[in-house]
Image (cartoon, rainbow, N blue to C red):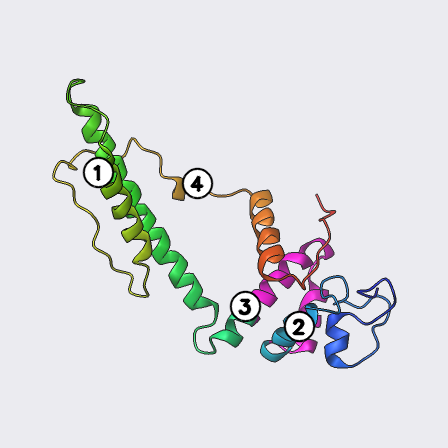
Amino acid sequence: MSANNGGGPCGACKFLRRKCVKGCIFAPYFDSDQGTAHFAAVHKVFGASNASKMLLRIPAHKRVDAVVTLCYEALARVRDPVYGCVGHIFTLQQQVVNLQAELAYIQARLSTLQLLPPSQAQCPSPTSLHSSSEVGSDLVSSSNMSMSIDRPQPQQASIELTSFPNPFDQELENEELQALAREFVSRYLPGVRFRPSTSS
């Protein structure tokens, strides 16, 4: 199946300078426009033959996720030949740690306010709200490659926080993961095309 209705080659065959035959394994996923650049990265990192063999071994309904992964890892490796996607993973992990620290700080503040008498538990002033938002933005913006941070230690934060659910402990369902993957494709891999999964 060709990537274009007009019978032109798909992005992979266009890059490889060959005729795009019916049933081309790459045609459903790489268009003839931006798909060429994405396949070039896949070819450079994995090789066209290896990518083809890999996709042929994968069930058809899972090939979309495989193509997304191949493109993501290949583009990451091209941008960062040393670390590849690992550098991005480290950055995301650091952001998670920073957000967990901010969440723990806010939960401790809420617990402290809940223990105060009603007369003292007044709404925070705009100044305190501004300073609180600065703390949160400082925590998030301090994302770096070292996995150690200084977590805020409020004076009255000795309260158990186990009663608060931790959203990072909840796993996403497969449908949500697929939705995230497709959103990633539409934003960062516009040349990669996919079709709705028909599997159960």
Residue lying at the far top of the rendered structure = 118
- Which is nearer the N-term, disc 1 or disc 2? 2
Which residues are drawn in magenta? 46-74
Mark 4–mark 2 Cα distance, whole angstroms, equals: 35 Å
Type of amino acid at the residue the image marks with label 3: Glu
Residue 57 rendering spot, x and y as whole percentages: 70, 64
The residue labelled by disc 3 is 73
Q: Which residue is mark 2?
A: 39
Residue 170 numbered tag: 4
Q: Amino acid at mark 1?
A: Thr
Q: Are marks 3 and 1 in contact (CB under 8 Å)?
A: no
Q: What whole-number distance in Å separates the C-alpha atoms at marks 1 and 4?
A: 34 Å
Q: For this rendering, which residue is in front, 191 or 177?
A: 191
Mark 1 highlights which residue? 127
User: Counting residues from the N terminus, which is met first, the one under dot 1 or under dot 4?
Assistant: 1
Mark 3 or 1 closer to N-term? 3
Residue 115 is left or right of residue 7, and the answer is left
Tell whether label 4 touches label 1 (CB within 8 Å): no
Q: Quadrant of the N terminus?
A: bottom right
User: Depth check: 93 or 200 in front?
Assistant: 93
